[in-house]
Amino acid sequence: MDIKQRIPERAAPFDDILAEMASYRTNDADWKGGKVWSLVYHAGDEFSEFLKRAHNLYFSENALNPMAFKSLRRMEAEVVRMTASMLHGDEQVAGTMTTGGTESILMAVKCYRERGKARGIKQPEMIAPESAHVAFEKAAHYFGVKLRKAPLDRNYKADVDEMRRMINRNTVMLVASAPQYPQGVIDPIEAIGALAQEKALPLHVDSCIGGFVLPWIERLGRPVPLWDFRVPGVTSISADVHKYGFSPKGASVVAYRSMEYLKHQFFISTDWSGGVYASATMPGTRPGGCISAAWAAMVGMGEEGYLRHTAEMLDAFDALRAGIPKIPGLVVVGQPEASLLAWSSEGHETGKPRLDVYAVAEQMAARGWTVDRQQYPASVHLTVMSNHRKAVDAYLEDLRASAAHVAAHPEENSQGNAAMYGLMAKVPVRAFVRQGVQKVMESLYAPNPKFEPDPEDSHLLPERFRRYEPHVIRAIDTVFDLKTRITRR
Ligand SMILES: Cc1ncc(COP(=O)(O)O)c(C=O)c1O
């Protein structure tokens, strides 16, 4: 299909335009059927229609100027307040809405960098567990804060002793996750909070994915270790309404224990010829619909709705957690405590996996499932939602068949995407992988990108990396096993 090159001279009929747009969906992932394990959080068609109306009600308004649209300022304040009380914050907790988890994390890092600067720190550093979301690396990249990654313990939790060892006089913040994305594990936040208090450092808890699900898991009577504002050392939390809060995309909350922290997040310019300018978050213009729809999602879901969806999610989660280890050769990685999990091969801990995970992933993809491949260890990630309850039996059946296929056809491991992902994880010089991915980004954002799948383009790595002889790969394997063993003591 040709890419449009210019604005058409004549406007097309609205119905034709909408039909054309709908036709672009042909190759999109099928999220409604439960075959996608991230990206879309769906609470049913009726709820979606309600959210669209709520979004449309403030379709034109702009929260850039909260004085002009007090309606939006009110709803933003209420979203933050409702979130803060869900996270057991008191009336001092202050925060803002952002466009998503990444922006909430960017804002927290920017805030603590400024706070550090006010205390004379010129070369700021943050300490985050290796499993912390990549948005912290992005924040480090954007804001010139050095990210120091603390190793994990055997259970994929932050190693608090390692974090303690890394603190120095440039440290401006500590980070923990509830839960972290790769394995769904909650860091030992009470211990990290105690460390933060002892060293008088702020602690940001990234609960972008857990914020709107852990409180309900706890309310349903499952043990959840303390992780929110009840932990005295926690100074801020990010929680995404657009994940388990079921709002449409573009809504997260970053909440601080008090204005003493939040005040460092603001940007103020006094000298621009366009006037004195102040903003609380990254964007200038802020779409009103994201705020009104997030407000509507929370009020329209209510505690009862969140509890119901969480209970349904837990049914699916429990079935996966119990069913995956029953498949010969597969295991669940670590001990996931919330709504996320990753499966891998038996033996991955010792560097001698029984099955090639990426080959099993290929088999799952061929059966129509969207697979989120991870590395260190090679695994596949599942973000489990209420919407997956109906899909779990089919998933487990296909996973059993896929694992059996790979066990019976080991020769396929070194072919196609399975080989490519395996190799990407193993190339020891990460700059090579970066180069390959850079090329992919350039082709995705090229002036005339291709949208039809092209089998020739299916590998991310330049040809020369695919030429590694098997013995070189074995050597790389050894280096990597060593590295994983060192970092996961
Ligand atoms: C733990 C965690 N933090 C941050 C993010 C980033 O959120 P977003 O994709 O909304 O920017 C995610 C996304 O999955 C996450 O799981």
Image (cartoon, helix red, strand yellow):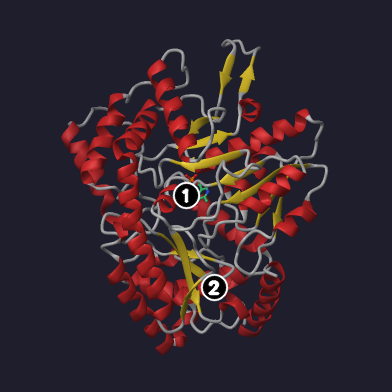
The quadrant holding residue 34 is bottom left
Q: Position of residue 386 (x, y in %)?
A: 32, 55
Q: Are marks 2 and 1 in contact (CB under 8 Å)?
A: no
Q: Position of residue 286 (x, y in %)?
A: 45, 26
Q: Is disc 1 surrounded by few (<14), some (14 to 19) or many (20+) residues within 10 Å? A: many
Which residue corresponds to the image point at 65% horizontal and 30% vertical from the top-left?
261
Q: Residue at x 46, y 64 (%)?
A: 341
Q: In the visual, does 488 lie left or right of 274?
A: right
Q: From the viewer's perspective, is residue 272 above or below residue 324? A: above
- Secondary structure under tag 1 reads loop
Residue 350 picture quarter: bottom right
Q: Element under label 2?
A: helix
Q: Residue furthest front?
A: 221
Residue at the outermost bottom position: 408
Mark 2 beta carbon near ligand 1 (under 8 Å): no
Depicted 154 relative to depicted 124: above or below: below
Q: Residue drawn 38% across and 26% down? A: 288
Of 25 and 148, which appears nearest the observer? 148
Q: Amino acid at mark 1?
A: Ile
* Residue 158 percent location from the top left of the image: 65, 58
The earlier-in-sequence mark between 2 and 1 is: 1
Within 10 Å of the Cα at label 2, are there few (<14), some (14-19), or many (20+) other Cα atoms?
some
Counting from the top left corner in percent of width and height, residue 16 is at 18, 37
Amino acid at the residue labelled 2: Gly
| One can see residue 38 in this view | yes
Q: Which residue is mark 1?
A: 209
Is label 1's Cβ within 8 Å of ligand 1?
Answer: yes
Q: Nearer the viewer, residue 136 or 413?
A: 136
Which residue position is annotated with label 2? 422
